[in-house]
Image (cartoon, helix red, strand yellow):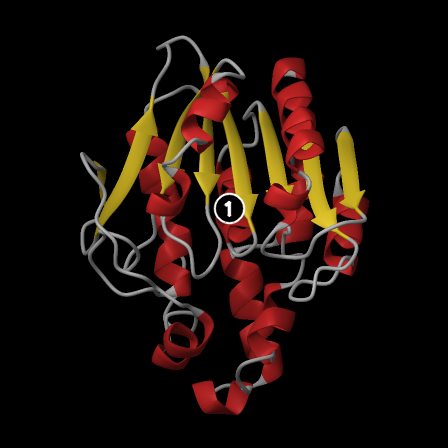
Amino acid sequence: MADTSLLDHPIISQRYFFPLACDIPHPFWVDCGDAQLACAYHKISPTAKTVIHFHGNGEVVADYLDGFPERIGSMDCNCFLAEYRGYGGSSGTPQLGRMLEDVNKILEAVGQPQDQLVFFGRSVGSLFALKAAGLYPSAAGLILESAIADPLERLLLRMRPEELGTDLNSLAEAITRALDIPAVLANFKRPVLILHTRHDGLIDVSHAERLTSWCTGHCDTEIFERGSHNDIMFVNAPRYFDLVKTFLHSL
């Protein structure tokens, strides 16, 4: 297990994450030892592929319960909505390093073979979907929506390395040890779908371009001309879900 102490620094937890408390009915609990994650699991068939969805910052699993699992189910896939420590009905405190380590517990709890899993990460959730792809490189596929190519770039918008008691190189190295995104995508040979808006005001479209360039397997990238970071799905719903459906049916 990697040393996550730097990425678990309280300043990162306080400035980068925006947890909301919200209980859901009948949670699917994932035991991470020092935290219990209140996830949701919508199953249509034990033999269907399972989409594991990692939501964005400032969101919770409850935000996706109304219609999203059924939409994925209509595409012949089970839907697992992953919650984070400190978010929703989960216990614990959001800590980047530990949250990345929690991904393995989530994958184990889903209990499906690698080739039956599709990882779907939105915004900050892309980090956890990419972590999953690094752990399970033989997964069926990977979907990245409004995704992050450079976690260091994002952290530096909210803090200076000196505030964490470190320097820029040490922080960069800690991030790479926990999640080396170019290396993950170089090793992930399964299909990838990247969705982004050209006018994303939070995570610039250059992140989608970098992620696309690092993929070594088949990659489809859609840059929507309408919408921004928080309404990409709603503004582009027909095309958005058509792309997801086509992708899932191609696996």
Residue in the image at 26% along x and 59% along y: 21
Depicted 168 relative to depicted 179: above or below: below
Depicted 92 relative to depicted 47: above or below: below
Specify the quadrant of the image occupied by residue 199: bottom right
x then y, percent, for residue 91: 20, 57
Q: Nearer the viewer, residue 217 or 230?
A: 230
Q: Residues within 10 Å of mark 1 (few under 14, many from 20)?
A: many
Q: Nearer the viewer, residue 197 or 216?
A: 197
Q: Is residue 184 left or right of residue 81?
A: right
Q: Is residue 42 left or right of residue 187?
A: left
**Total numbered labels:** 1
Q: Nearer the viewer, residue 50 or 237?
A: 237
Q: Which residue is mark 1?
A: 131
Depicted 124 relative to depicted 202: above or below: above
Residue 89 appears in the rendering: yes
Residue in the image at 71% along x and 60% along y: 200
x then y, percent, for residue 34: 18, 56
x then y, percent, for residue 216: 77, 36
Q: Is residue 106 left or right of residue 193?
A: left
x then y, percent, for residue 143: 61, 36
Query: Where's the C terminus, which quadrant?
Result: top right
Specify the quadrant of the image occupied by residue 170: bottom right
Residue in the image at 44% along x and 78% along y: 15
Residue 191 appears in the rendering: no
Give the residue type that dot 1 points to.
Lys
Q: Nearer the viewer, residue 153 or 6?
A: 153
Question: Element at badge 1?
Answer: helix
Depicted 78 relative to depicted 64: above or below: above
